[in-house]
Amino acid sequence: MRRKITTGCLALVLVLAAACGASGPSGPTLTFVSTGSSFQDNQKTAWQQPFTTETGTAFRNDGPVDEAKLRTMVEAGKVTWDAVDTSAAAAEQYCGKYLEKLDFTVVDRSAFPPETVSECGVPAYYYSIIFMYDTRKFGANPPTKIADFFDPVRFPGRRIVPPEVAAGLLEDALLADGVPVEQLYPLDVDRALRKLDVIKSVTTFAKTYGQIQQSMVDGQVDLALVSTARAHQSLKAGAPFEPVWDKTIVNWNDLVVPKGSANRDLAMKFIAFTSKPEQSAKFSELASVQPVNEGIKPNFDDVQRRIDAFSPEHKHSVVLGNAKWWAANFDAVTQKFTAWMAG
């Protein structure tokens, strides 16, 4: 009988404690959506944990980013996401309809390059798509320009390319075909696909960025178009690859707030917080991406410096993507690219 009374009292204490908020953070909760894996873990470390310390805000993490799910939530009026890491093109395309317009009295737009800021999103980081090759395969005659990726005669071997058509694949194909950088946009999609026809049979179109990394580490490919973060992880794991600094497509991801978020104002404060120099530098160092604010200098390790497109010796290769063009053309290009893949 005594044990029953003790157990009952303990249960009452726990209920009261929970009611008073003693069992968890005292602040509100933001749901943050990103790509998962170690990349999102780095966002927790660099952004979320210090924001929790400063404001008492707790975080629930979700992923991966699914734009169809975002649209469905907004249309149904049942939005459970608060801050989302998505492409700059999506931020442009969905602005006002599926995404809240940012409050620029909270988010300091002057902290970002003007061409990267939209009404509904500000950049969280730059990422590069780097052309890399296996030194064991091409040690005596390495590729030196982007055109070499699309030349299976002079540079035979298995290729792998990113899972997103808007990440730089079409741009690389056009640059390899002789299109000048200043005339790249609007993209001539048909011309790019004709250039891709040349390597289609020897190319793996990756389903994920992790697949690219694993293929490089396992020696399954000889040439790769790979994101900065995955290039870093591949090299750390011993993949014998080197970059080619001819043309390097650079894009950025935005942080956005879904339309109808119950925590809209707090989400915008969080977005503003992530752009602070300390948070931006920390995330860049952890995830091997580049701050969009050139005044922020991450403390990169030796491997990261080898693949830093923004370093003085590599910056000549940078070709900045055009998020506005992709926002206006993404659906049509995706439809055409999907048909080409199936053909």
Image (cartoon, rainbow, N blue to C red):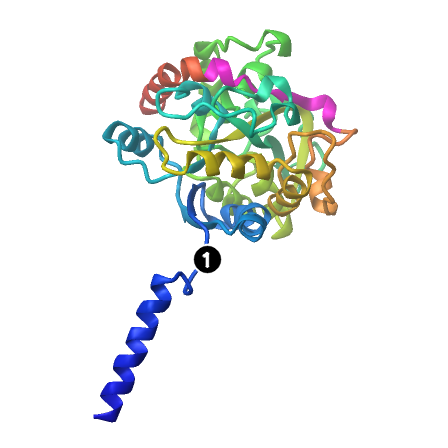
Q: Nearer the viewer, residue 76 or 92?
A: 76
Vertical placement of 302 versus 197: above or below? below
Quarter of the image containing the C terminus? top left
How far across and down, in percent of the image, does residue 311 sit? 75, 32
Q: Nearer the viewer, residue 124 or 204?
A: 124
How far across and down, in percent of the image, does residue 302 sit? 74, 46
Drawn side of residue 169 relative to residue 341, left or right: right
**Residue lying farthest bottom?**
1
Q: Residue at x 45, y 12 (%)?
A: 189
Q: Nearer the viewer, residue 11 or 149?
A: 11
Quarter of the image containing the N terminus? bottom left
Vertical placement of 177 versus 150: above or below? above
How far across and down, in percent of the image, does residue 15 sit? 31, 68
Q: Secondary structure at mark 1?
A: loop
**Residue lying farthest right?**
312
**Is-magenta flag for residue 71?**
no
Q: Which residues are magenta?
A: 314-326
Q: Residue at x 29, y 80 (%)?
A: 9
Query: Quarter-wise, where is residue 65 in the image?
Result: top left
Q: Can residue 63 be seen by looking at this rendering?
A: yes
**Is-magenta flag for residue 316?**
yes
Q: Residues within 10 Å of mark 1 (few under 14, many from 20)?
A: few
How far across and down, in percent of the image, does residue 313 sit? 78, 29
Q: Residue at x 50, y 46 (%)?
A: 40
Q: Which residue is mark 1?
A: 25
Q: Residue at x 43, y 48 (%)?
A: 28
